[in-house]
Amino acid sequence: SRYGSHPPHRLLLSATMGEAAALDRLMFDPFQFSERVRETTADCPLLAAGRHIFKAHDLPQHFDLDLDALDTFLRVIESSMPQNPYHNRTHVLDVLQSVHALLLTDRLARLVPPEMKLACLIAACVHDVEHRGLSNDFLIKVHDSWAEDAQDAGANEVHHAKVGLSLLARDGCQVLRRLDTAVADQVLDTVRHLVLDTDMKRHAHTVEDLVALARTGPLEAPQAQGESLLVVLSGIIKVADLGHSWTLNAVHVHWVRNLEDEFFKMGDMEKARGLPVSMMCDRSAPGLRDGQVGFFDHVLLPLFTAFADVIPECAAVPYQAKQNRDAWVKPTPGKDVEWTPGMTAVGVAAVGAALVALLAMKRR
């Protein structure tokens, strides 16, 4: 074995329990964690974290999961992620950890049944598998095979769901093979639903569902089933997928730079093909950093606030997001937040509105 007699998750957790404890906190630095894994074991952060995360919810024991298959599954996911600036294996680790930390909060830990926790964690693992750093709109414009397979709707998400489910059926990756058939089918159906729900065209629908659910107050046992539970699970995945916006500020800024770089790279491809450059993707125009306030106000905070209304124990999510939002308006001296001095409030609002329009384009 490339890891000797001990797999990387054992080497990591035996080396320092601090790294394991970091995985259980809402505020998490995936860059620091990944660097620590590389120093301690090998270049496999998702594998190092994955076993700890699944065991933290007692899932291997509850379902008699094949842990060797889980390790192989995580290796395949990690190796399937291209080296994009943003949609890469560190993002997958970040989303998996965020789902895990949210599920550890008291209300979700108590009310989400084991099979749905399993579905959430698997969905986090596969939600961006093989992502090429290209938007759905771009894939449609160039008549990419992913868009054709998805009939021009949710090209990325349809591909991620299809590949993710096929991996779970692959020899050596059959994590669910010991589950009762009916339970396994329920997990797979939920995984597919959750991955498809990460499509930004469904964002407004998710927010509306959470707002409606919140009208009856915080989630309680009678609601934690059927469609209401599915709304909460979709909220978990959406909140986790956008976790870069409610993490520690320095980590947030790091992610924004990476995403802006990925957008610019796509814009370069559009220019090379003679296509109109998508909003926020032109290096000569305002980028994501200039539009963060509008993005928080119109897209992120409505989702996070509605989710926290349903799950009050997750109030740290909108709170930290608001801190990050405000840092773009009034950077604290010495803090690592870049700001364009010439951007007025009107300019910020305009750029934010343009970003919302970009997200709307992905709904086609």
Image (spheres, rainbow, N blue to C red):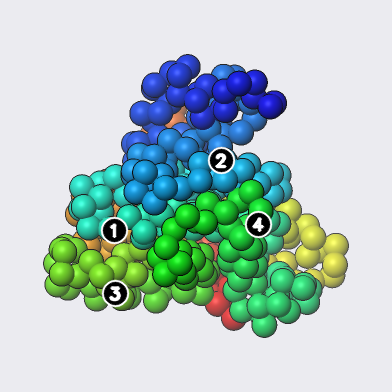
Mark 4 vs mark 2, CA separation in Å:
13 Å
Point 56% across, 27% down: residue: 8
Q: Position of residue 334 (x, y in %)?
A: 44, 27
Mark 4 vs mark 3, CA separation in Å:
29 Å
In this rendering, position of residue 53 left or right of residue 253: left
Q: Position of residue 332 (x, y in %)?
A: 38, 34
Q: Amino acid at mark 4?
A: Arg
* Contact flag, marks 3 and 1 (Cβ < 8 Å): no
> What label does residue 293 carry, if any?
none
Residue under label 1: 113
Quadrant of the snapshot with the N terminus: top right
Q: Amino acid at mark 1?
A: Pro
Residue under label 3: 226
- SS of the residue under disc 3: helix
Q: Nearer the viewer, mark 1 or mark 4?
A: 4
Residue under label 4: 170
- SS of the residue under disc 2: helix
Label whose residue precedes the other's in the sequence (3 or 1) = 1
Residue under label 2: 68
Mark 1 vs mark 4, CA separation in Å:
26 Å
Q: Residues within 10 Å of mark 4 (few under 14, many from 20)?
A: few
Label whose residue precedes the other's in the sequence (4 or 2) = 2
Mark 2 vs mark 1, CA separation in Å:
24 Å
Mark 3 vs mark 1, CA separation in Å:
12 Å
Q: Closest to the observer: 317 or 183?
A: 183
- SS of the residue under disc 4: loop
